[in-house]
Image (cartoon, rainbow, N blue to C red):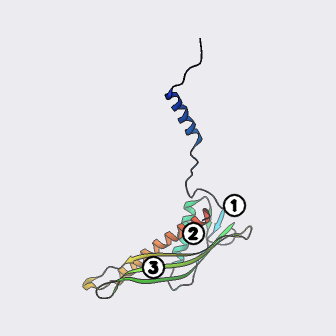
């Protein structure tokens, strides 16, 4: 008698599934890789320099970048450039607020907020600049009109503040991604 069993299509399918499950697909989640050398554990993110006339914009950008670093990796992030393995320095070079659309009374009703900044991420162990970039971010915001069709100043500044927050989040995501993913 022959002890050899025949494997039909069902047996072949089970073996194929088992092989595929154990092999994996080779894909990984974006943003999980580490471009940074292993010895970089502490990153300094001092307050960015603000060369514009927009008050306290550097605080919003710097805080968003710190928050993004903390949320994206296992790095210790501190607000100084000493006692760290690497430092991220930033300069806000220009901010413009430009009318984009107008009302029938020729008052601006929509503005474009544009921010230009430079960043430099330096490995303090080697002294090498790992990332250096000039960045530009824009966002639009609409200004609601008050009574009588006139624009309301408090609404204008409130919408501008919201635009600054959105640009700061986009800026932080882009900066941290460029450092951690080497784009």
Q: Mark 2 points at which residue?
A: 175
User: Tag 2 or tag 1, which sits nearer the N-term?
Assistant: 1
User: Disc 1 on helix, strand or loop?
Assistant: loop
Q: Mark 3 points at which residue?
A: 113
User: Disc 3 on helix, strand or loop?
Assistant: strand
Q: What quarter of the picture does the C terminus occupy?
A: bottom right
Q: How crowded is mark 1: few (under 14 residues within 10 Å), some or many (20 or more)?
A: few
Query: What residue is shown at x 74% (from left), y 68% (from top)?
Result: 126
Q: Is residue 35 above or below residue 23?
A: below
Q: Position of residue 45 (x, y in %)?
A: 61, 71
Q: Is residue 18 above or below residue 167?
A: above
Q: 154 or 1, which is in the foreground? A: 1
Residue 66, picture quadrant: bottom right
Query: What residue is shown at x 55% (from left), y 22% (from top)?
Result: 6
Q: Mark 1 points at which residue?
A: 37
User: Tag 2 or tag 3, which sits nearer the N-term?
Assistant: 3
Q: Position of residue 158 (x, y in %)?
A: 39, 78
Query: What residue is shown at x 56% (from left), y 39% (from top)?
Result: 20
Residue extending furthest toward the bottom? 106
Residue extending furthest toward the left? 148
The label shown at residue 65 is: none
Task: Give the spatial CA distance, label 3 vs label 1.
Answer: 36 Å
In the rendered structure, the answer to whether residue 107 lies left or right of residue 133 reads left
Task: Give the spatial CA distance, label 3 vs label 2.
Answer: 19 Å
User: Tag 1 or tag 3, which sits nearer the N-term?
Assistant: 1
Residue extending furthest toward the right? 126
Residue 123, picture quadrant: bottom right
Task: Give the spatial CA distance, label 1 vs label 2.
Answer: 18 Å
Q: 15 or 112, which is in the foreground? A: 15
């Amino acid at each position: 008698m022959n002890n050899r069993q025949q494997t039909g299509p069902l047996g072949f399918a089970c073996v194929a599934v088992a092989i595929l499950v154990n092999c994996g697909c080779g894909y990984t989640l974006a943003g999980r890789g580490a471009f940074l050398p292993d010895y970089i554990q502490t990153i300094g993110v001092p307050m960015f320099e603000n060369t514009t006339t927009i008050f306290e914009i550097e605080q919003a950008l710097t805080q968003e970048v710190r928050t993004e670093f903390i949320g994206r990796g296992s790095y210790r992030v501190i607000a100084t450039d000493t006692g760290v393995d690497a430092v991220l320095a930033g300069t806000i070079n220009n901010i413009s607020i430009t009318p984009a659309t107008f009302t029938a009374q020729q008052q601006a009703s929509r503005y474009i907020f544009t921010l230009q900044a430079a960043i430099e991420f330096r490995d303090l162990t080697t002294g090498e600049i790992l990332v250096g970039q000039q960045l530009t971010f824009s966002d639009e915001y609409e200004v609601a009109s008050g009574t009588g069709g006139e624009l309301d100043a408090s609404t204008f500044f409130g919408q501008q503040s919201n635009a600054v927050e959105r640009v700061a989040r986009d800026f932080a995501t882009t900066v941290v991604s460029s450092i951690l993913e080497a784009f």
